[in-house]
Image: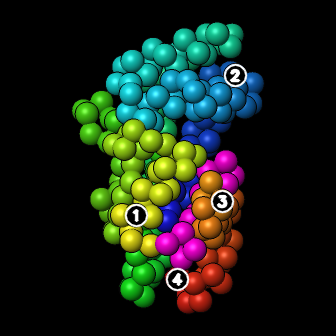
């Protein structure tokens, strides 16, 4: 089971940091805003499919203003979209896993794009057996129910599942359910760890 942003795709944090630099904000300003917003604010609501993109822009800009800075939320999200493209080693690893007869899933917190369809970040180029998107399900990590839903759709017991994510807060529920977890800080190191778990090469 693979998270997308920060695992299969580059981390969105890179786009947040680029926005800080481009707009003269102190390093970590946008990261801090999104961290708070992703708990119970506009970001969390967007990923549960509860806000349209225009409503999200307005809500996130209000949250930024409450923290004392101006934010162009549309520009932030455009910058995020422009940086997204799958990491070739991760794509190859997913292909190898499926070649070995194992099932794969994408489990992602995402949002509905302006045209009303989930923002899948180029997902069509990658073959997963199951895709679970927060904006479709109305649930988002780290809610344990979205992990259980993914396992159910895969038809796999948690003890037979491996989950990769770049955020510890998202790995904790998976580990509590009995899944093997891998935190993705360096993608190559994470794939090496996954190779050890699975027992076959992924390149």
User: Which region is colored magenta?
Assistant: 157-172
- Which dot, 4 or 2, sits closer to the camera? 4
Q: Name the residue under label 3.
A: 176
Q: Name the residue under label 1.
A: 152
Where is residue 123 drawn, in percent x and y? 35, 57
Name which of mark 2 and mark 3 comes first in the sequence: 2
Say what secondary structure mark 3 lies in.
helix
**Of helix, strand and loop, which one carries label 2?**
loop
Query: Are circles 3 and 4 on residues that touch, CB within 8 Å?
Result: no
Residue 164 in the magenta stretch? The answer is: yes
Q: Residue at point 57% right, 84% down?
A: 198
Is there a contact, CB below 8 Å, between mark 1 and mark 2? no
Say the numbered circle drawn on residue 203. Answer: 4
Residue 133 % position (x, y): 39, 48
Name the residue at 70% across, 22% down.
25
Identify which residue is drawn at 65% across, 78% down: 192
- Give the x, y percent position of residue 107: 46, 56
Residue 117 seen in the figure: yes
The part of the image, by quadrant, that contains residue 81 is top left
Asked if one can make out residue 75 in the rendered structure from this viewpoint, the answer is: no
In space, the residues marked 4 and 2 are separated at their CA atoms by 40 Å
- Residue at mark 2 to residue at mark 3: CA–CA distance: 38 Å
Q: Give the numbered dot on residue 33.
A: none
Read off the residue under disc 2: 25
How far apart are labels 1 and 4 at the CA level?
A: 28 Å
């Amino acid at each position: 089971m693979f998270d997308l942003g920060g695992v299969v795709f580059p981390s969105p944090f890179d786009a947040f940091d680029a926005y800080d630099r481009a707009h003269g904000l102190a390093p970590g300003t946008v990261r801090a805003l999104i961290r708070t917003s992703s708990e119970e604010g506009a970001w969390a609501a967007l990923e549960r499919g509860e806000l349209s993109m225009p409503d999200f822009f307005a809500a996130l800009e209000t949250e930024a203003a409450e923290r004392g800075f101006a934010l162009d939320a549309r520009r932030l999200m455009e910058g995020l979209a422009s940086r997204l493209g799958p990491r070739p080693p991760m794509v190859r690893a997913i292909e190898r896993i499926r070649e070995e007869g194992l099932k794969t899933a994408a489990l992602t917190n995402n949002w509905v794009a302006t045209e009303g369809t989930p923002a899948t970040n180029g997902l069509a180029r990658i073959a997963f057996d199951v895709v679970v998107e927060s904006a479709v399900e109305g649930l988002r990590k780290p809610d344990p129910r979205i992990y259980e839903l993914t396992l159910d759709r895969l038809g796999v017991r948690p003890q037979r599942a491996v989950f990769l994510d770049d955020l510890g807060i998202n790995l904790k529920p998976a580990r509590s359910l009995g899944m093997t977890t891998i935190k993705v800080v360096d993608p190559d190191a994470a794939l090496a760890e996954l190779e050890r778990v699975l027992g076959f090469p992924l390149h």
